[in-house]
Image: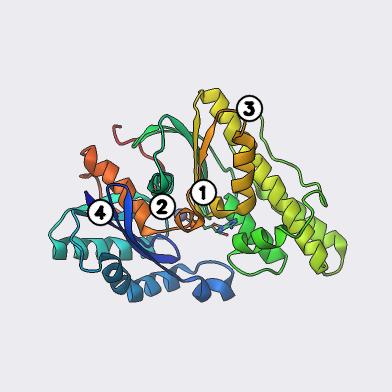
Amino acid sequence: MRVLGIETSCDETAAGVVEDGRILSNVISSQIHLHRRFHGVVPELAARAHLQRIAEVVETALNGRKVDAVAFARGPGLMGPLLVGKMAALAASATLGCPVVAVNHLEGHVFAAELCGKIRFPLVTLIVSGGHTDLLLCRGPGRYRVLGRTRDDAAGEAYDKVARMLGLGYPGGPAIDRLARRGDPQAVAFARPLLPGTWDFSFAGIKTAMLYHLRDLKRKPTRREVADLCASFQEAVVETLVRKTLAAVERCKVKDVVVGGGVAANGRLREAFQEAARGRGVRVSIPPPILCTDNGAMLAQAASHRLRLGRAGRSLRCDPGLGFENWGA
Ligand code: KG4
Ligand code: ZN
């Protein structure tokens, strides 16, 4: 089965074609430069930019190929941008004479790992992006149990806000990732918000601790200090994510972990997950960075499961707050 996936939920205009778990194309046009001076995504600008680029991105991804279905993300994301993706998917499906399938953007992040090798169910999955920090038990496509999620800022949001405090560009994740390599992760002891007794996360405290640290410094931090702060902040976030995920793995008695979403592109997070899994008999799958951040191929892969299981006829309504739904429910 060959599926075209169209992704426009935030600031990436993307389309990809996947055939039986194999990527045939994955075209991503990033809007980062457009939003940089606002230190965040401006929904109206994002929607307009998607509209300008979507036709060319989809045509490049298709490259004259025929497909069996067209998928788009109906949520979560920004309403204007989501609607552009939906309209593009409806237009493509009418032109190509094939069905349109609405998928959940978060499911795309889970199934991105499958584009690089088989994943085994049941598994625990951690989705860490600009808008989400979700920990789930997944028994198969469409069978999810949310274990925990963030109570305040998403992991990526914390990266972006801390980067702004440190005078680094937008998005903050890649900038902190890069600088942290030169810093000392032990320089500043940020608390690890483990929230014992729950599977939830909370990153607002680390963000505030960074704010107070910079305020008390009463001067601009030096380059060395910025690198140390990046490394210390990153270590606190990464350690929290890894420890809680592996505790869930133990509790749920599973052997497989899938990590996805933009923050899964983080070098230290990837390394820390593999270090922690080693010796515990746990297999951690994290797709390459280009498949961690938003893309169309991941949506095509999520749609393939829906089509295979006959769950494609559900609502096409865009829902900015969409969470993980069980298909059988
Ligand atoms: O999944 P994604 O592309 O879009 C959403 O669905 O939100 O994630 C974007 C987020 C941003 O907050 C960005 O700062 C973060 O992922 N990110 C990273 C890295 N690359 C992107 N965070 C940490 N380290 C990275 N290398
Ligand atoms: Zn995403």
Dot in front, 1 or 4: 4
Question: Which corner quadrant of the image does residue 27 belong to?
Answer: bottom left
Distance from Cα at disc 3 to Cα at disc 1: 21 Å
**Residue matched to label 1:** 132
**Residue matched to label 2:** 76
Q: Give the residue type at disc 4.
A: Val
Tag 4 secondary structure:
strand
| Disc 1: residue Cβ within 8 A of ligand 1's nearest atom | yes
Label 2 crowd bin: few (<14), some (14–19), many (20+), radius 10 Å = many
Quadrant holding the C terminus: top left
Q: Give the residue type at disc 2.
A: Pro
Tag 2 secondary structure:
loop
Give the side of residue 231 with respect to residue 150, left or right: right
Q: Measuring 50% from the left and 46% from the top, which residue is drawn there?
A: 286
Residue closest to the eye, 107 or 148? 107
**Residue matched to label 4:** 3
Residue 197 numbered mark, or none: 3
Distance from Cα at disc 2 to Cα at disc 1: 10 Å
Residue closest to the eye, 161 or 3? 3
Label 4 crowd bin: few (<14), some (14–19), many (20+), radius 10 Å = many
Distance from Cα at disc 3 to Cα at disc 2: 28 Å
Q: Give the residue type at disc 3.
A: Gly
